[in-house]
Image (cartoon, grey):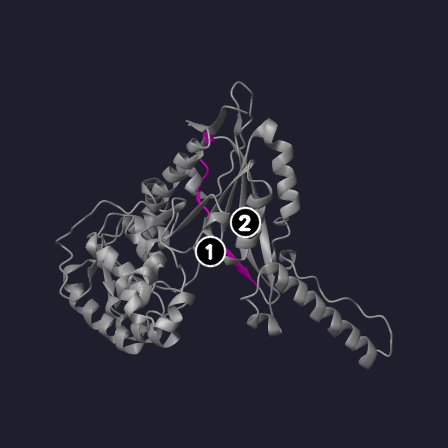
Amino acid sequence: MDSLVLKTSVLAWFVRLVFRTSNSSICEELQLIGLGLDVVGSKYDPINNQKSHLWSTLVSNGFCMFDLRITRPRGGINEWLHWLPVSLHKKLDYVVRQICVYSHVLFTSGGKKIASLPSINCSSVGLSSVLEADVKQIVSMAHKTFEKDGPLLVVASGRDTISVASSIRRLASDYVFVVQIQHPRTRLDRFDMVITPRHDYYPLTPQAQEQIPKFLRPWITPREPPGRNVVLTIGALHQIDSTALRSAAKTWHDEFASLSKPLLVVNVGGPTSHCRYGLDLARQLIAYLQNTLLSCGTVRISFSRRTPEKVSKIIVKELGDHPKVFIWDGEEPNPHLGHLAWADAFVITADSISMLSEACSTGKPVYVMGSELCKWKFADFHNTLKERGLVRPFTGCVDLSESWSYPPLNDTADAASKIHQALAERGWTLRA
């Protein structure tokens, strides 16, 4: 197969880490995409599947896409075993479950047969249509379909997909192109490409090295600067681009078009290990917003699932009755996309890299609350945003009638371009 052509067709955006949780399991989604790669002159019938958003930038004519899941046991002692590789975790969980079964038989059932414990898989949580990722089956498919349909593009996201994705590449390196989203910490040469935020490499900077005791430095990852197969983004990958914003603007027109301008959207997250805050920041945010209300027409506030109840309660108490303020109650539909499309400016707490990344993809003013409280690589992320002119601190002295802008953050499209280039280097020509 000297010359392979990737007949492209836009797939909906990039693969983001998807957690599906229940009392029994965590499922991390691994995207297996069989792209329309075939010998020049052969035919390939495209399947239009709108699923993940990098592919809308990546490809635009044809592919087969499969969603495969990786399930990690949960409950009991399993909550302490998430540091284990998934395969080992599953085997250990199986042994523990069998011991529990036989112990129950011996000591409480008098030797009578009892019903087996419920199977741990995602069918119990509404994911019966999503198959479990099986390395052998994927490798076999890659070999069998290569001559007809071309290589497979495997995109994996999250820690629990690392062993599966790396095994696929090890066993079928000539038939697959494996992309790992989020830094796998060690042995990046196991993947064709790794896409990760640049602040993941903060531990290698002189500032970070000064913060790490010498005896711990050998244990802090990453240990080496990014290699040729590493694509660095500024923020998190997401689905927001000009097309998504135009679509959201139409969808939410009836609710937002009549609102008084300028419209300020406030997104409140929750404290993290590297960005701690509590009621003090909430009270400061309230005071700043009360000052800002003089220059804006409408303020819409949203909380995340991580927002502490004490924080949301005090904000609702102090601002909930103001005629210019609307606070989303958490009920569907979620107005998040409408906010991104219709807002004139944003105020976002510093803890959420995802919310900031999305807001910075609009090109609109983004004000950050509490970045001075962030440490380690979170602080590095905020410094990068400030240096690039994407954000400004929220001080309460903001005049929203004076707008400002910047080139929108476009990490997903940039990552897609890098994948295009890498595929081309392997002799696979991308064709619109």
Query: Does residue 184 show up?
Result: yes
Q: Residue furthest bottom?
A: 107
**Is residue 146 found left or right of 404 in the rendered image?**
right
| Residue 302 point in image, percent of width and height | 34, 62
Q: Is residue 134 left or right of residue 34?
A: right
Magenta run includes residue 20: yes
Relative placement, left or right, of 271 versus 264 is right
Residue drawn at the location 56% of the way across and 72% of the way down: 80
Q: Earlier in the sequence, mark 1 or mark 2?
A: 2
Residue type highlighted by circle 2: Ser
Q: Which residue is mark 2?
A: 166
Q: Gap in Å between the C-alphas at discs 1 and 2?
A: 10 Å
Secondary structure of residue under mark 1: loop
Q: Secondary structure at mark 2?
A: helix
Considering the image in quadrants, where does the N terminus appear? top right
Q: Amino acid at mark 1?
A: Pro
Say if residue 305 shows up in the picture. Answer: no
Q: Which dot marks residue 223? A: none
Q: Which residues are magenta?
A: 8-21
Marks 1/2 in contact by CB < 8 Å: the verdict is: yes
Residue 73 placement (x, y as % from top left) = 61, 64
Q: Which mark is residue 184?
A: 1
Q: Residue at x 65, y 33 (%)?
A: 144
**Residue 214 image point, x, y percent:** 35, 71
| 372 lies above or below 196 | below
